[in-house]
Amino acid sequence: MPNPTDRRSVAVVTLGCARNEVDSEELAGRLAAEGWSLVDDAAEADVAVVNTCGFVEQAKKDSIDALLEANDLKQTGRTQAVVAVGCLAERYGNQLAEQLTEADAVLGFDSYADMSSHLTAVLQGHRPAAHTPGDRRTLLPLSPVARQESAAGVATPGHGQGAAETSRPDDVVVESPVAGAGPRVIRARLDGRPWAPLKIASGCDRRCAFCAIPMFRGAFVSRRPTDVLAEARWLGERGVKEVFLVSENSTSYGKDLGDLRLLDTMLPELVAVEGIERVRVSYLQPAEIRPDLLDAMTQVPGVVPYFDISFQHASGPLLRQMRRFGDRRSFLDLLQQVRERSPEAGIRSNVIVGFPGETEDDLVELEAFLAEARLDVVGVFGYSDEDGTEAETYGDKLDPDEVAERVERIRTLADELNLQRAEERVGEVVEVLVESVEDGQATGRAGQQGPDVDGVTQLTSGTHAVGDLVRARVIGTEGIDLLADPLTEPA
């Protein structure tokens, strides 16, 4: 092991979703265990590792731009090499390496366990061969219950396989939550936020016609509850107050472990972890939401009243074309079930407009659903072809200008409805996790607000610190953001 003062330095730059953030912190933990010094600023690092996103066209462009910006640092900073990892690198592999020569290496998921050796080789002037992309769904058995044994040999970032047992410096955070006991945690925190994403599964078994994620993320694999709880304890020891459970499809959790109710039973255990005061579940498939899961998410104290439900549209016929289930009526029935259990629940979703074959009637059906649904946040995306998806082969494509017009039409409606929903919350009592304090002004998120994209809550008075949980009454709004007065007495 190199002397700490002689360590090479690395900065991990993350693009995309919270799942990628977990993958970046696993990579950082692996590199720290091998003697690398972690730095925040890529300009101060020997190697900039860019964890790319390959979800949609804009995300791909952002990832390419980040790689090019990092490459510029080789002329102006100490940076010697730029390495692309993550979904874009996994999805396009050698094709990306050929077209983006500015990257000194393009490494897929199978490279993560030995990332230190790859980065060392790059700094020594070698250019590791980029992998040839393939359908990662074929790496595991078709039957979910047959996957767990096979999954040990398949790279699934964020699952922490292959923890090194070598000696390491005291400041490296690859360790058991309790010395000498329990599963090892391979992770290094890259920020000081009072919340952290926690991966419970990777991959997806659904075959949505517009989505390429299953091809490059692979088949659905759950992490074992013991591993999830060990990582939650590790996070709780490091000041994390809220864990944000992430996956491609949280409603499938446990199906490959033989028990679809594992998430229901794990939620109380997560809330009981020392230091963890809130648990948030993300990415629920409406066709897979069970009454038992709704009960657990609304009745377990400490599980926030938050439902991130992937509707994508509301027209039954168009959803069939998307290879999805449901329609306006079934979705509204589901929302009623949520609100019967938790009247003040926060509910967010995403929708796609301009899908091949979408008619005016389909669009009107979507508008009617949004008007009735009273969602807190709606992300509106215009359809575009994704390489290798079924929808890419469809005819009846809409002109891009028409898609853009429909996006604007639905986004305008959604924004107006989201503002109305925020105003409906005036008078409610919320619990706010303080995430920043500037000039005495504390800002955080209520339980109904997810990280980054669902708005924030500003506290109007009081002295608060990052990580505080504050009960407050909503007194106003600024857009979808809430203004709230802290309560000095129980509501």
Image (cartoon, grey):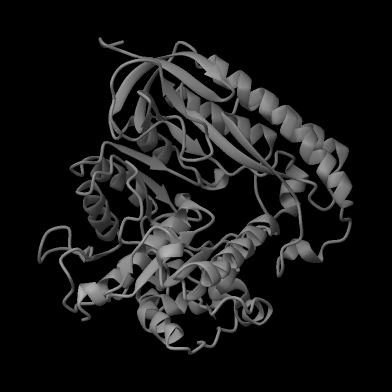
Frontmost residue, 227 versus 233: 233
Which residue is farthest front? 76
Q: Position of residue 173 (x, y in %)?
A: 23, 63
Frontmost residue, 48 versus 249: 48
Q: Position of residue 96 (x, y in %)?
A: 64, 76
Q: Taking the image as drawn, is residue 362 in sight?
A: no
Q: Quadrant of residue 78?
A: bottom left
Q: Quadrant of the N terminus?
A: bottom left
Placement of 348 over or under 59, stated as above or below: above
Q: Quadrant of residue 98?
A: bottom right
Frontmost residue, 257 versus 46: 46
Q: Taking the image as drawn, is residue 454 in sight?
A: yes
- Total labels: the figure holds 0
Frontmost residue, 60 versus 50: 50
The structure residue drawn at horizontal position 12% and vertical position 58%, both measured from the top left corner, is: 178
Which residue is farthest left? 180
The structure residue drawn at horizontal position 62% and vertical position 80%, both measured from the top left corner, is: 97
Q: Position of residue 389 (x, y in %)?
A: 71, 65
Q: Quadrant of the C terminus?
A: top left
Left or right, residue 59 beside residue 246: right
Placement of 276 over or under 356, stated as above or below: above
Q: Position of residue 279 (x, y in %)?
A: 34, 40
Left or right, residue 293 beside residue 455: left
